[in-house]
Image (spheres, coloured by chain):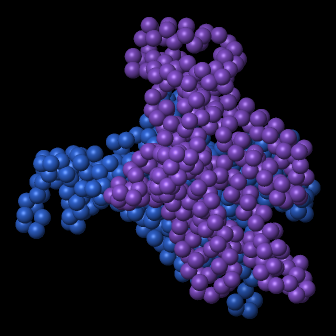
Amino acid sequence: MRPGAAPAGPGALAFRRLRRDRWALAWGGLFLLLVVVFLAAPLYADVVAGTGPSDNHLTDQITIAGEPEYVVSLEGIPIGPTWHAEYLLGADENGRDLMVRLLYGGRTSLLIGAAALALTLLVAVPVALAAGYFGGRTDSLISRLLDVIWSFPALLVGFLLASAVNLRGADIGPLTIEPGSKLIPIAVIGLVYVPYLARPLRGEVLALRERPFVEAARAAGFGSPTVMRSELLPHLWTTMLVLAPLLFANAVVLESALSFLGAGVPAPEPSFGVLIEDGIDDTVFSPHLLLAPCVALVLVVLSLSGLAEGLRRALDPQSAIAVEVVHGQ
Amino acid sequence: MIGFAARRLGWALATAFVASIVAFLLFWTIPNVDPSYWLGGAEKGTNETRARATEEYGLDDPLPVQYVRLMRSILNGDVECFYKCGSMRSAFLDALPVTLSLVAGAALIAIATGLGLALLCVRYRGRWQDRVITTAAAAAYSLPSLVLAALLWAFVAYRSDLFPNEGYVPLTADPLGWAQHLALPWIAAALPFAGAYTHVVRASLLQTAGEDWVRTARAKGLSEKRVIRRHVLRNALIPPVNIWGLDISHAFGGYALYVEVIFGLPGVGLMTSETFGSLDLPPIVALAIYLAIVVVLASAIVDIITAWLDPRLRRSELRT
């Protein structure tokens, strides 16, 4: 540091640690790359593959190394990976391009995961602030409620909720949710993970509440919402940043499990879970149908875990934040 | 201790009660939906099915009356269902040992592996063995059970004669067959947890090993084995035991669902997914409540065991 320069704050220090952490950067880079690739699904479908995720090509023929080949053979066996622009990873039993479906599926899974994470943050942060700051009866009511949700497995709660809503849709105020809507897995996954974020945050608020700067803000006449927003919230970023990638990974895995069980994204539309469910049917002749979504899902989870670990090393070197999540259970 | 157990079981009952009300309201009375619509199933919403359902289920009665009637039939085991009939409770009790075998075996494997690897890490702390194990554990932790189960079923079970494709044999009938049916599901379910537990136990061991009383034990001249076994391990295992407890109780409604579906194990997970596919309302609510009871009881039992291991927890506030 140059003499006379202001000392670096904790944020700048953490950022510096993160920038020097090669593994964290590598995992973060891989994750960003995956996001970009999956988001570019429509581009790939239009420009490279020239077919959509739900377009069947049962009777088409393509030319590979000068030889004409059926996309789906007369025995009904789809073509394997061609490593060409068309059917890069092969086709499924309806002659749909697997690479196109995989990219669209990844896009759907990531979007659902991101939206669910946003919902979790949106609900968990105010709830944790209120519980920790007001204490007393508010706290015990909220904490007990969180405990009840937390004591049930996320997948079971998600499966029950999603099945209930999927069967007939729901009207929530002005919002009408159709059966099969993607809002269902988003809402279900987002809400199920609220306790996993709200519990640690509440603990922190509880400790922060007694600190002098909070007392000073209250003495200066600021109301509760202001104190929560401008005195308490800034201290919660660390925990939120460390837990967010883990919750994101969990949300993606939970979406896969729900879709696999038929309670998430409805079947013809691809997502990781739907593709795994499709792929497991015939792995003797078409192992690519199962391997591709499995590898893609593992890469997403692995890169997010690596990123989370790196963020933790940078932001929380003492490992003070308790992590109570194991993927998608 | 008995006081703690009683309080903990009381809380478990209260949680199950709340869960039953939520399940009832969720499936029975979502606003502006007439349950008889989908009681009618395929013949959705004809006047005839609606009248039949309303009469048969007493859907005109006030909600508390309906709730009590439904709960009574669920707990008696004579849930009436619209299509296939048969006692839900006895079907559930038949399926439970399968899931118990899956969950107990997987938990045992995960805990033993995690504990063993963590002890190795501590012994070789900071050396390459430590690094290899922690990296492998992080990788295992990032492999979702869903992917593992799908791959193991498709590429191992389906292609070899050693592991059956589906089904289950009770332990009492044929121990070897039991293990053959469950070996791959156990691996699929246990691997991510084994990875997570290696990290958790390692961190806890390292933290405990730095405590003053451990140094005192060494200074007293105790053997390293004794220090680790009596002084470090006993205390270091308390935080992981809590995590194991939660994971075991969650497993019944967690990975059991898809692992059983993939491996065709006739446990409560497979039953859940089949029942939900049938669109038959009372069995669905019954199953949700049976599962809630199992999860809540499992976590209560685990908490009581934890409190028995660590007397300090008995006095602390009730956890769920």
Could you tell me which residue is drawn at 58 percent across and 57 percent down?
Answer: B106
Residue furthest toward the bottom?
A: A3
The foreground one among A172 and B196 is B196
Residue A159: in sight, yes or no? no
Which one of the lettered chains is coloured purple? B
Q: Is B70 left, or right, of A109 in this rendering?
A: right
Quarter-wise, where is residue B215 in the image? bottom right
In the rendered image, the vertical position of residue B70 relative to residue A32, given as above or below? above
Residue A284: in sight, yes or no? yes
Q: Is B166 left, or right, of A63 in this rendering?
A: right
How far from the left and from the top, in percent, is residue B153? 40, 55
Residue furthest toward the front?
A: B173
Quadrant housing the N terminus of chain A? bottom right
Could you tell me which residue is drawn at 24 percent across and 48 percent down?
Answer: A93
The foreground one among B283 and B170 is B170
How far from the left and from the top, in percent, is residue B276? 49, 32
How far from the left and from the top, in percent, is residue B156? 38, 60
Could you tell me which residue is drawn at 33 percent across and 52 percent down?
Answer: A279
Q: Is B270 left, or right, of A217 in this rendering?
A: left
Could you tell me which residue is drawn at 70 percent across and 41 percent down?
Answer: B296
How far from the left and from the top, in percent, is residue A218? 89, 54
Which one of the lettered chains is coloured blue? A
The foreground one among A326 and A128 is A326
In the rendered image, the vertical position of residue B261 relative to residue B134, given as above or below? above
